Image (cartoon, helix red, strand yellow):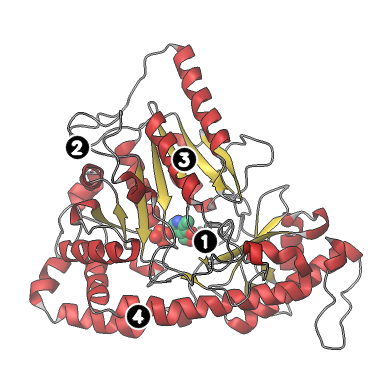
Amino acid sequence: MASSTAETPSSESSAPQAQPQQQQPSSTRTVNASAMASDPGHPKKPINLLRGWPSASLLPTTALNAASQRLLGNPSLATPALLYGPDPGFEPLRGALAAWLAEFYGTPSDIERVAVSGGASQSVACILQSFTDPAYTRAVWMVAPCYFLACPIFADAGFGSRMRAVPEDEEGIELAVLEAGLRKSEEEDAAAKDEKKCFKDPGPHRKLYRHVIYCVPSFSNPSGKTMSLRRRQGLLELARRYDALVICDDVYDMLQWRPATTTSSPSSSSTGEAPDLNKALLPRLTDLERPLGPSPHDPPGQRFGHAVSNGSFSKLAGPGLRTGWTESAPDFAYGLSQTGSTRSGGAPSQFAAAVVYELLVSGGLAAHVRDKLRPAYRRRHGLVVERAREVLGPLTTGMVRSLAGRDDVFGGYFVWFRLPGGLKADEVAKRCQAEENLAIGTGGLFANEVRLCFAWEDEADLEDGVARLGKVVWRMLHGKPMEVAAGGAGRGLDELK
Ligand SMILES: Cc1ncc(COP(=O)(O)O)c(C=O)c1O
């Protein structure tokens, strides 16, 4: 059976292996692979707006080649890079990363807070191995719509039937829903009166959390939304109260730009000041927790905290590097480095981490993000939004605004929007595949939202892909082909809101 790797649809199955349980009828939504595999005999060229990969044209191959050569030509780095490394990761990278993150997030640099990982996905698995217990940890609370490939990682850790969806609004996760769920879960547990069993002994360097909360606070996959500051603060406050660990996939934070196109509504626009794109828009949850005292759930003398930032070089350099990092309270970082497989093998991706170190200290990574990725994604995002406005009309407004109250910064890989006329996204996706050889991401069985990734296909195919989607939507709504105006563009769907 074909396997499904990060953001790649399995050719044999349309549904994710596991979805969060529905907390509210409309809240459970992940992004599904298109229902049908690409047909090699299809007369139209395949276009894939589902795949969440960087385009091959955006990989820093030359800079990585130079970084590898510098590394291998320097025995003082090459030798440790090719041996087992220390548990928290290749130390020069940890130091360089701590400084780089401090610069971007405006926080003090502290190497003890940083551990090298094998990418964000593997890092979640290690976090769950070290800090959760399938009996003691009550549930995993996931912001919905959620990054669909996170679900099997939670299922593998024993939470397959205990993933709970929490909806998000314009500002991000709905805290009242989350709190009601956390409270109910604890009340149910107290009423059950059974002993709070634990399968695991966390030992002196780790602790077990009662709950896990999973989210993508900035430029979320799939919704593109950014959680507001007050929601971040509220979320942290709840986590500290209920002994929850918030795992934040902060993988898109640095991919931000001023959109080529905005909704042009003064009320929804910027605060007047041009955002500095070399700085984070908002603090991470782990940054917000840093100045707070110990939580009531920290063991005496230790500070594990309740938030971990899960970062990755996948979207900044290349997913094949399989290298990322976590930033957290120092005791948490050390505890994570004591995960069994890390203690046995050293931190994952030792060699790739050393190459990334060279890329980082040479300034090559910052230049790649600043000069190549941000301009390219800005252009690509603009093309998708413009083309979608032409064929789908004002329905696409939400595609530009990622942060409640402002539309002057957008980021990440995706636009996400509701289809007109109550069309079901899965049906639209099936017809896109069958009629137009176009793959798109959908929001689940009855949802009517779609996700388009603008990172993978080249720019001409991005535009063509959105035009094909517009044709399918038109045909489904009208039962006939789209009328083509003199200028060549299809008539918009404005009247069909
Ligand atoms: C939110 C989110 N987390 C994690 C990943 C995967 O990260 P990595 O390649 O570092 O495992 C992705 C990739 O699409 C993602 O969108």
Circle 4: element type: helix
User: What residue is shown at x 58% (from left), y 56% (from top)?
Assistant: 404
Q: What kind of residue is marked 4? A: Ala
- Along the horizontal axis of the image, is 315 left or right of 165? left
Rendering coords of residue 178 (x, y %): 53, 35
Residue 186 position (above or below residue 362):
above
User: What residue is shown at x 22% (from left), y 48% (from top)?
Assistant: 337
Crowd rating for badge 2 (residues with CA inside 10 Å; few <14, some 14–19, many 20+): some
Cα–Cα gap, marks 3 and 2? 28 Å
Answer whether labels 3 and 4 touch (C-beta < 8 Å): no
Camera-nearest label, 3 or 2: 3
Instruction: List the residue tagged with mark 1.
Output: 7
Query: First in sequence: mark 4 or mark 2?
Result: 2
Instruction: List the residue tagged with mark 2.
Output: 205
Q: For disc 4, does the CB lie below 8 Å from ligand 1?
A: no
Camera-nearest label, 4 or 1: 4
Cα–Cα gap, marks 3 and 4? 35 Å
Front-most of 41 and 111? 111
User: What residue is shown at x 46% (from left), y 40% (from top)?
Assistant: 234
Q: What kind of residue is marked 3? A: Gly
Instruction: List the residue tagged with mark 3.
Output: 234
Rendering coords of residue 185 (x, y %): 50, 24
